Amino acid sequence: MAQQGSLELLNDPVAKALLDSVNPARLAYAWMDGSPRVVPIWFHWTGEQLVLGSPPKAPKLKALAADPRVALTIDDNAWPWKVLLVRGRATVKLPDDVSPEYELAAARYFGPEQGAAWVSTLRGKPMARIAITPGWVGILDFQTRFPSALTL
């Protein structure tokens, strides 16, 4: 079994299920004054990066430019809880249109027809593309992997 922190955990069945789920990610980052922020957000897993979409004037973009270090969690709500924990760095680009990854996320969250309808309302408008490259990965499944405080 891969150790907590290993990128190999992204291939674990728990991670794969959460990365394919319609559960929102929760993105944590540091605000300009250093205080923590967490926001729920759609994501798309490319196999190498978690890609998020955001309005180009979202306040988090200024904070990510100043400090690209982030943490992200994807979890489910059924016992035994399963949680994917990711720490990494975010890079932000500002394309003139919806990113392909946001389009794929919309189809996953809303279904193909409603996802396409939603994306059509955003076409031709700039959208920030936030790509998170994992540097540390952890899994909690409350069966074989528990929070460290419970295993000490």
Image (spheres, rainbow, N blue to C red):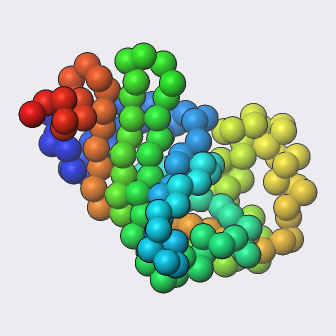
Q: Quadrant of residue 96?
A: bottom right
Q: Position of residue 9 (x, y in %)?
A: 27, 42
Residue 33 in the image: above or below residue 150: below
Question: Whole-percent x and y of residue 19?
Answer: 48, 40
Find residue 33 and report its horizontal and vertical position in percent.
49, 78
Dividing the picture into quadrants, the one containing residue 81 is top left
| Coordinates of residue 39 in the picture (x, y in percent) | 58, 54
Q: Can residue 133 be seen by looking at this rendering?
A: no
Residue most extreme to the left = 152
Q: Quadrant of the C terminus?
A: top left
**Residue 63 appears left or right of 99:** left
Residue at 85% across, 61% down = 122
Left or right of residue 131, residue 146 in this image: left
Q: Give the mark count.
A: 0
Identify which residue is drawn at 28% across, 44% down: 138
Is residue 128 left or right of 13 when viewed as pictured? Answer: right
Which residue is drawn at the image coordinates 62% and 51% (left, top)?
A: 41
In the rendered view, does 4 fall on the left or right side of 68?
left
- In the picture, the quarter occupied by the N terminus is top left
Vertical side of 149 occupied by 53: above or below: below
* 57 up-or-down from 134: above or below: below
